[in-house]
Image (cartoon, grey):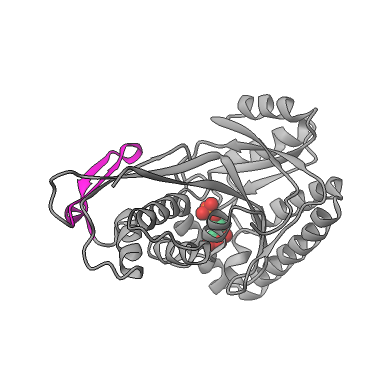
Amino acid sequence: MTALSATAPGKIILFGEHAVVYGQPAIAVPVSIVQARAVISAIPAAPNGQVRLIAPDIHLDSLIDELPDDHPLVLAILLTAGHLGAQRLPAMQVHLSSSIPLAGGFGSSAATAIAIIRAVSAFLGRPLSNDIVSELAYRVERRQHGNPSGIDNTVVAFEQPVYFVRGQPFETLIAARPFTLVIGDSGVQSSTAAVVADVQRLHQADPESIDRAFTAIGDIVRQARGYIQAGMIDNLGELMNHNQRLLKELTISSPELDLLVEAALANGAMGAKLSGGGRGGNMIALVSPQTASRVERALIAAGAVHTWITTVAPILGPT
Ligand code: PMV
C-alpha cells in the first residue's frame, strides 16, 4: 500500500457561538488558509494492529496501544475502523501535521479528527461520505468537549459555509457577494470545554436572562443569513458588533480580545467580534479589501500574535 493523505480546513464562526449549544442557529465558514493534514503509510514488516501515531505539533510519537483509548486521535482511528467493521488494523504509520493554532477558535480538534478519519478510511480502501465523517468526528468532539453543538465537525467535514441548528440538517449558505475578513489571533489559548461549562453554570444560575441573550443572538444570526444571501454585506458589521456586546455580557470575551476588537473598529473595520469558544483564541473583523492591511497592522500593534485575511466567496451550492 502506498502513502495516502487527507486534509481538513480550519473554520471560523461568523455569528452565534455558544448560543448554538442551546438550540439557536449559528453561521460558520471553512478557512483553508489553515489546515490539518494526515498522511498514512504502511509500516513494513510490522505485525497487524501496530499503529504508530506521530504528531510533531503536540510532541507525540507512540504506538496507539501505548495511548489511552479515549485519546482523541486514537479515538478517531478506532471509531473509523469500528465503523468499517475492520477487526484488525493493518500496520500503519499515521503522521499528523497542522497549521491550525491549537485551542484558538479555529476548530483544530474537529479538523485533526476529520483528516485522520478520511485518511484511515481511504487507507482501508473504503473512503467515507462527508455525512459519516462528520458523525464520527462529532463522537470524537463529544469525548473532548462534553457538549459540542456539532457545528465544528459539520463545517469542517462539508467545507462550505453553513447555517447550522443543532440536531437539524445544516443549510449551505450561499453568499450573493464575496466579503473579506481579517482574523486576529490573541495568542491566548483557551479551552472551549471550560468556557462552555462556565456558560452552563451561568445559565443554571439565571436561565431567564441568559436565554434572553441567546434569543437575541439567534435573531442576529437569522438577520445575518438574510444579509449574506442578499449580498447586503455592509449591514453585517453592526450585527457583528451587537453579537460581540452580547458575548461580552455573557463573560465570553476577554481583555485581550476586547483590545483587538476596538483596534479593528478604530482602523476602519465595519464590525468585529470574537470567534469560537472565546476568552482567548481568535477575533474576526469585517473589512473592505482597501482597509484589510491597515486593520491587520492595527491588530498586531494591539497584541495579536498572528493575522490572516480570508474571503468568504459565493459558492454554487453543495458539492
Ligand atoms: O472554540 P471552537 O472553535 O471549537 O468553537 C466552539 C463553538 C461553541 O459554540 C462555543 C461550542 C459548540 O460546540 O458549538
- What is the x, y in percent for residue 31? 60, 44
- Picture mark count: 0
- Quadrant assignment for the C terminus: bottom right
Up/down of 30 relative to 151, above or below: above
Asked if residue 316 lies left or right of residue 319, the reply is right
- What is the x, y in percent for residue 165? 64, 69
- What is the x, y in percent for residue 83? 36, 69
Residue in view at x 32 percent, y 60 percent:
75
- What is the x, y in percent for residue 212? 71, 70
Up/down of 217 relative to 109, above or below: below
> Can you tell which quarter of the image residue 154 is in?
bottom right
Question: Which region shows up in magenta?
Answer: 49-68
Q: Who is closer to the viewer here, 239 or 180?
A: 180
Residue in view at x 78 percent, y 29 percent:
291
**Residue farthest to the front, as pictured:** 1
Asked if residue 254 lies left or right of residue 175, the reply is left
Q: Is residue 205 magenta?
A: no
Q: Is any atom of residue 212 visible in this view?
A: yes
Residue in view at x 51 percent, y 59 percent:
153
